[in-house]
Amino acid sequence: MPINPYHPRTRLATHEVTNQVPPLIGYNVFATDTALMAAVDREGGHWGRDRLNAYGAIAGDELIGIGFEANENPPALKTFDRYGQRIDEVAFHPAYHRSMALAKEHGLHGLTWTAHRAGAQVVRSALVYLHNQMEAGTMCPITMTHAAVPALRHAPELTAEWLPGILANDYDPASRPAGEKQGLTIGMGMTEKQGGSDVRSNTTRATRAAAGDDDSFRITGHKWFFSAPMCDAFLILAQESLDHKNEGLSCFLLPRWTRAGQRNAIQIQRLKDKLGDRSNASSEVEFVDAEAYRVGTAGRGVATIIDMVSQTRLDCMLGSAGLMRQALVQAIHHCRHREAFGRRLIDQPLMTHVLADMALESEAAMAYSLRIARAFEAADAQETALARLATPVGKYMICKAAPALVNEAQECLGGAGFVEESILPRLFRQAPLNSIWEGSGNVQCLDMLRAMTKSPASLEALHHELAGARGAHPAYDAHCASLEKTLHDDTDNPMQARRVAEAIGRALQARILLTGDAPWVGEAFCAARLGDGHGRAYGTIAATLDFTALVERAFADDISA
């Protein structure tokens, strides 16, 4: 058959199509990430390499494809069925369900709790990091399902009833009672219109169900952000009343279906029309005498839920680090294939400088997140204390860094980075979310101050951690000395909390990289991030660093090159 001269793969009527970047698909997201592989080994997850390699292949092929489909076809609310009966269900595109199924099949929702070996949370965190690069919306219910486990353990009877389904690797999107399903998902409803992060101002009420029934409660009220309303049950906060006395804010498990097999009184008012996270459903709801079960002690809802919140904040870090990673990879791939002014973009000195600077930020975010994942699972008081301080610090710093890095990656692609056919517009819309979800930046920084004043062991753990790299780089030593003075002077000054958080976060990132598999990366990080040797934009660090080596480390073996 003769070649059609007008076929778009050969030439158009007016010109030949040349100098175009091949699509980045069909690559292994794990195997091309040298720094991630080293961090997984360093933090105790070496035994999970085969699992991560398998999911890396899925992420770079099937998952990136269905990620586009799921976000181009957002969920829709079905308030009533054809007969006029209220059903309050959310319909999703098959791509969303496939993404959820992949996540559950590979243990992103439960590996921390089911592997029963050191490094389980590290491996699970690395899986989350891979998934977030390609489809972040489905991580909302996966994150909450994973994080609900430590909170539910405050209620042994509920744990026995619900945990098998929560930890099962099955995904069942059907709307039916939990007892009829193999796999379950858990959502969350904390904030209300009048309070937001100030959950103690919640007005939703919980009262005992009936005389002689000391198990169930009835919930009446609303939630302004009710995450993933298609889940099988939700952890919520409500003011508990007992004998006309307010016991305070308590935590409750509120199922979608009652134990009698009826739809629970959860009325979805609308789905949020969000900037990003388009594949996932967030909603506004009202509870009209809905059935629920208390988790933990009456009036101790915040204390009960805090273990869940800590876990979800770690996932915010991982999510932002994943977005940064994928944006960086897209930028490097583009620059390796696109020519301008007579040579490839990757060979243009200033572009290499920009990419190397982005690579430092991306690797530091990932390394910090996996280090804290190890601290989460360690049965060690010092590690627990470190996590208590480093979690709000990392949540603040890493989530703040994501939008700027993703935008810089868009600029590397030029106009193509602003077009929906590339993944970068979706990454950019997604990037601000994690700095808002689970407490804004100010909330995180104030929580950091609370940790330092109420848990002095967290400061001792920080000092011990930072001492591990003392003498490795002059800028690091100078930064730590300055930090010591700051911690002495400003731990009770809320106006300085953001500055303190950034100083702690940068010190920890430098410490991790200086003692990692490639200390030269840590040295470059110290030169680029500590002190005054950099500007406000990417590509403004000292020109003495080996930019080419940093870029090559960032995305190894681009298979489509």
Image (spheres, helix red, strand yellow):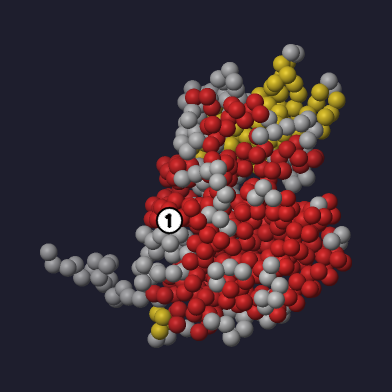
> In percent of the image, x 65 and y 53: which residue is there?
375
Where is 342 relative to 471, above or below?
below
Three-letter residue code for mark 1: Asn
Residue 312, position as x, y percentages in the image: 64, 48
Quarter containing the N terminus: bottom left
> Above or below — where is 438 with respect to 505?
above
Q: Is residue 367 left or right of residue 395?
A: left
Viewer-closest of 177 and 510: 510
Residue 10 vs residue 252: left or right?
left
Task: Please indicate, yes or no, whether residue 304 appears anywhere in the rendered image.
Answer: yes
Query: As rendered, which of 531 and 235 lies closer to the eye?
Result: 531
Secondary element under disc 1, as helix, strand or loop, is helix
Picture mark count: 1
Q: Residue at x 81, y 52 (%)?
A: 455
Label 1: which residue?
53
| Nearer to me, 51 or 309 | 51
Q: Quadrant of residue 483?
A: bottom right
Q: Quadrant of residue 27?
A: bottom left
Q: Position of residue 165 (x, y in %)?
A: 53, 32
Please name the residue shown 42% across and 75% down the image: 336
